[in-house]
Image: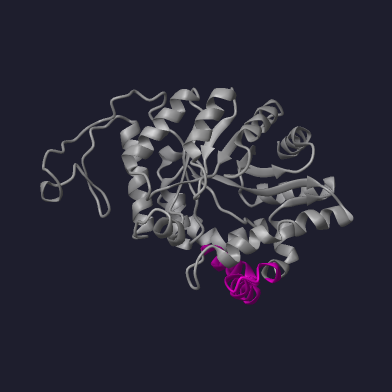
Amino acid sequence: MRIGLPLQYAGDVRAAADQVRDLESAGLDVVWVAEAYGLDAVSLLGYLAATTETVGLGSAILNVYSRTPALIAQVAAGLDTVSGGRFELGLGASGPQVIEGWHGMPYAKPLTRTRETIELVRRMLAREEIEHDGKVFTLPLPADQGTGLGKPLKMLAHPVRPRVPIHVAALGEKNVAMTAEVADGWLPIFYLPERASEVWGESLETGRAKRSGDLGDLDVIAGGVLAIAEGEQRKQILDGLRHFYALYIGGMGAKGKNFYNDLATRYGYGDVAETIQDLYLDKKKDEAAALIPDELLELTNLVGSEGFIQERVAAFRESGVTTLNVTPLGDSPALIEQVKAWAT
C-alpha cells in the first residue's frame, strides 16, 4: 500500500508544507489537499510542488461545479507541469450546501456532471480538439446560447503527461459504481473496512464489470488518524474526533440530504445517526458529539497499541485499500516510517 496524508484546509499552510517536507523524507507517498469553502487547494498544491521533490500531490477534492472541465484540465496540466509529473486529480460533486450556498450554482445532475467532467478532462489533457454534446456540457457553445463564434479548440500547452490519475470522492451507491467504472481511484470518507463490502461491494462490482482494461486496478484511498496510544491517552484521542464526526454526520447537509448520515445508517448506526443529526441541527453540538459510536471511531481510525494498529493496517489492506491515508499524531516522521513498514 502507498501511504498518504490528508492536509486540512485551515491553519498555517506554511507549517503544513514544512511538515510535508519532513514526511516526504520519511517515505510519504502522496499528500492530499482539501478545499471545501476555505483556502483554494490549487495555491497550496503549487507551493508544495515548489518545496517538495518526490511526494505525490493530490487534490481532495476539487468540486465539479465551481470550475469548468476546461479549467480543471488546465489546473491539472499546470500542477503536473510544475511538480514534474506528480499531480493526482481528486474530484467530487461536494454537496448542495456548499455548491448552492457558497458557489451559488444549482446542485443538478451530480453524477452526470462528474462523468462528463472526467471524460472531457482526459480528452483535453490528451490535446484532442474538443467537440462534446452531453447532457450537462456542450462544446463549443451552440450559437443560440452565445455569440455563435465558439469553435472546437485543443489545449495550447503540451502537458508533462497526456494523462493524470483522476480519483473521485464518492459515497452513494450509484456514485461509487460510476467511480469504479471510469475513475483511476476512489476517495471514500469514514471508511470502515469490516463493513465496506456490505455497504459498497455491489456498487464496486457493478462498476468494475464495465471498467476499461486501460484503466488498470481501482486505487482505493482511505484511512484515518494514526497514533500509538493506549488507555486514557487513546480514549482522549478518539474523543477528540467526536466533534469532527458529528459535524459531518449531523451538520453536513439537511434532513434527508446528508450523505455522511446516510453512510452511518448503512453501517448500522441508523437510530443514533438520526438523533445526532437532530441534536446538531438544534445546535446541541456537544450532545451530538457524545453520541458518536465508540466502535465507529475505533474501526475507522488507527489509534491504539502497535499490535492493534498492525491489525487495522491489515484490515484496510484486506478490504481492498491500496493507498492508506493517515493523519499522524505524535512523532509524525517516525509514525510514517513505521506504518509504511507495516503496510509493505
**Count of all numbered marks drawn on residues in the image:** 0
Can residue 198 be seen?
no
Q: Is residue 281 inside the magenta stretch?
A: yes
Give the residue drawn at x 44%, y 24%. Answer: 81
Report the front residue among 127 and 53. 53
Q: Is residue 17 left or right of residue 94?
A: right
Can residue 81 be seen?
yes
> Percent x, y for residue 148?
11, 42
Q: Please, what is the dominant secondary structure of the magenta stretch?
A: helix
Residue 282 appears in which quarter of the rendering?
A: bottom right
Residue 98 appears in which quarter of the rendering?
A: bottom left
Compared to residue 173, the image places residue 334 above or below, namely above
> Percent x, y for residue 13?
60, 36
Q: How is the image coloured?
A: one colour
Q: Is residue 44 inside the magenta stretch?
A: no
Compared to residue 216, the image places residue 305 above or below, namely below
Give the residue drawn at x 72%, y 58%. Answer: 299
Q: Is residue 198 left or right of residue 70?
A: right
> Percent x, y for residue 12?
63, 38
Q: Is residue 266 left or right of residue 176?
A: right
> Percent x, y for residue 142?
14, 47
Which region of the structure is painted magenta?
Answer: 259-287
Give the residue drawn at x 38%, y 48%. Answer: 66
- Where does the N terminus fall, quadrant-wise? top right
Report the front residue among 182 and 23. 23
